[in-house]
Amino acid sequence: MADTESGSPPGVEEPAITPPDRRRRRFSRPWEEPIEAPPDDQAETPPAAPAEERTEFLEADDAEPSISEEAYLSATTAEYRDLAEEIARGGTDDPATMPAVAATMAGVGTGLVDFADVTGRPGVSEEDVERVEQAAASDLTLRIISALVLLGLFMATLLLGGWFFTFFVGAVMVVAVGEFYATLRRHGFVPLSLFGLLAALGSAVAAHLAGPGPMLVVFLATIVAVTLFFSVLPRRRPVDNAATTILGAAWVAPLALATTVRRAPDGIALILMIVLLTAFFDIGSYFAGRAIGRNPLAPVLSPKKTWEGFVGGIVTAVAVAALLSTVDYFIVDLRQALILTAIVVLLAPLGDAAESMIKRSLGVKDMGSVLPGHGGMLDRIDAFLFVVPFAYLYFRTIGLL
């Protein structure tokens, strides 16, 4: 019969030949720590058994156990009980808490219901989302309204012809050069705005009356007037201010040739061809760039312009040119339409790049805000400033003017 202080269950005798260290070896567990050495005044640890005795012990392990299965399980449970009590003593008295989980999902705020936001980023409320959507819708509405107003004025004056169209072109030029001078003034320059505005309006009138020759006279007169002004009345930074004044006048002056094209027998058709090809090239470039644009066309000047968008614009412009060549009203064959398309796709991006270069050097996004949703007038006509003069030369070459 086992002693009452023994760890064996009542009624079960321990094997007489199993010393304590062998019993630990039989029921050992990987997580058990080595037993600390007893003090010097206690009995010494029995010496290790000889090799022959260990061999007998291993053979005895392979033999059929001398205790029942129920007794074996009870003894094993007693060992696990001590381990469980130790783990319980090492834990805290605080109840277990569920960790909060946060994830970022499209359209869903961070954090979970009844849990604090653990991301550290402010969430977007429903009111903020609605405000952004309303602003975008309002901006789109303004873009559409301003585009329709400008298109309506253009078509009305184009159909009326004569001085109506000339004054429309002159007004566009005056607004554009005025935006340019205003932007320069905000950055420390002091251009002679009056001289530039008179040069723009005078170029439109001269082109309407007698073509490009008088236009050149108006431009040369502007250069002389600006030079004399800074020579007689010394001003701060005369070279910079004189150069920017002449630059503004020279930049928008070529648009006046549109009035000369309008005075031709088929002037309406020719003007419409220039406008449609340039507009559809810009539209095709925009949507192709948004859809598949990856490689920047001009990373420094226009990071958003891509080669994929440029190719998409070319494809769109060629398709429109082929369609227009089938309409008798536009008086051009497919070859002539494609040559005009080549002029557009080569010079329209250069016009946009020229304005982007100036805006980047001045650190501005738009030249003005006269067209709600579109920016300034100069932002809308930058491509035409390069396309119109070369289209005029091409029409003259093929005898349409």
Image: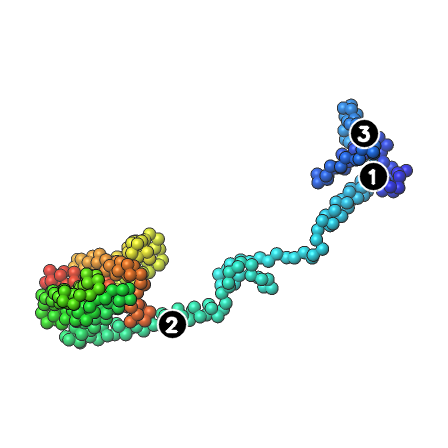
Of residues 324 and 99, the one nearer the viewer is 99
Which comes before the other along the chain, label 1 or label 3? 3
Crowding around mark 3 (Cα neighbors within 10 Å: few <14, some 14 to 19, many 20+) is few
Which comes before the other along the chain, label 3 or label 2? 3
Is residue 108 visible in the rendered image? The answer is: no
Tell me the quarter of the picture where residue 319 sits: bottom left
Q: What residue is rendered at 32% in x and 71% in y? A: 372
Gap between marks 3 and 2, in whole Å? Answer: 93 Å
Q: What residue is rendered at 19% in x and 58% in y? A: 343
Q: Is residue 9 left or right of residue 341?
A: right
- Residue wearing tag 2: 138
Of residues 387 and 396, the one nearer the viewer is 387
- Residue wearing tag 1: 68
Check whether the beta carbons of the residues at disc 1 and disc 3 lie within 8 A of each other: no
- Residue wearing tag 3: 46
| Residue lying furthest right | 1
Q: Amino acid at mark 2?
A: Ser
The figure's colour scheme reads rainbow
- In percent of width and height, residue 362 lies at 29, 61
SS state under label 2: helix
Which comes before the other along the chain, label 2 or label 1? 1
Of residues 135 and 291, the one nearer the viewer is 135
